[in-house]
Image: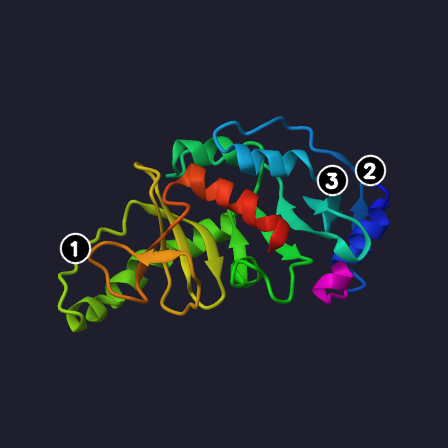
Amino acid sequence: MADTPNELWNAFLAKKGRTLQPDVDVALGQSHEWQRGSFGLAPDFSELLQTTTVTPVRMSGVDYELLTWGEGDALRGWFTAMPQDVGDALVHPMQRELLAVFGGILEVFGTNPQPADGGWWLNQRAILSSEAYSLGKQFPEYVRASDWAWEDAGLEFDFDPEPFVGIAAEANSNLTMLHTGTGQVVAFLPDHSYGGVTPLEGCPEYTLYTHDEAQDFASWLDWLGRTWPTA
């Protein structure tokens, strides 16, 4: 861990092109290795966490963590929320287990200008965070408002969006959703140019998709673990 906490924080601000307001109070803790053990249900994602450098951040009285990989110009990372107890919230059991050790991604930085994943990481507004969960509440409305796409394609609209919660959200309303019972992951992609996705059975293009390599929550987490190093 060659970079100091201040160097890591300043690199985050520089790569995000951000200048904090003078009244924003920031206190940085000592950087350290990941200390919350492994998340065995998703080994690739867990391995990624094992290789990160964690810098505690307290900003305007709220605790966060800066997770970083690499050094210098190759530095990249996530600005993350703290782990959380989601209480009685409707989530998948594996998601509940994850949130107890990892609070979700609020911002990413240091991604490649021409990433191998088609820009998925670059486009995300929130990943595995309470904001992604909140934005996902619009999913039923979005899907039902798109029923015309099924009609235009000569397909019957037969999809229940209610059992899903948001796990990733983009500014353009693209959403990645998790079924709280089965663990199925689907993506609502009305505006996308991604490869590696296939329309959900019975669904037209630019509506609901499955990830070719990540059709359930465990495989989706591992997809994050595999794609982040080259994102």
Rendering quarter of residue 12: bottom right
| Residue at left offset 37%, top offset 55% | 187
- Region in magenta: 13-19
Residue at position x 24%, y 62% in the image: 144
Residue 89, percent across and down? 41, 38
- In the rendered image, residue 126, in percent from the top left (x then y), is placed at 53, 55
Label 2 or label 1, whichever comes before in sequence order? 2
Q: Residues within 10 Å of mark 2 (few under 14, many from 20)?
A: few
Residue drawn at x 55%, y 57% is 121
Residue 17 colored in magenta in the image? yes
Provide the residue designation for mark 1: 158
The mark nearer the N terminus, 3 or 1, is 3
Q: Amino acid at mark 1?
A: Asp
Tell me which amino acid carries mark 3. Answer: Thr
The residue pinned by badge 2 equals: 30
Mark 1 element type: loop
Percent x, y for residue 77? 68, 50
| Residue 112 picture location, percent across and down | 65, 62
- The answer to the question of whether label 3 and label 1 lie on touching residues, with beta carbons closer than 8 A, is no
Label 3 residue SS: strand
The residue pinned by badge 3 equals: 53
Q: Nearer the viewer, residue 89 or 140?
A: 140
Mark 3 and mark 1: Cα distance apart in space: 45 Å
In terms of depth relative to the viewer, which is nearer, 205 or 162? 205
Q: How many marks?
A: 3
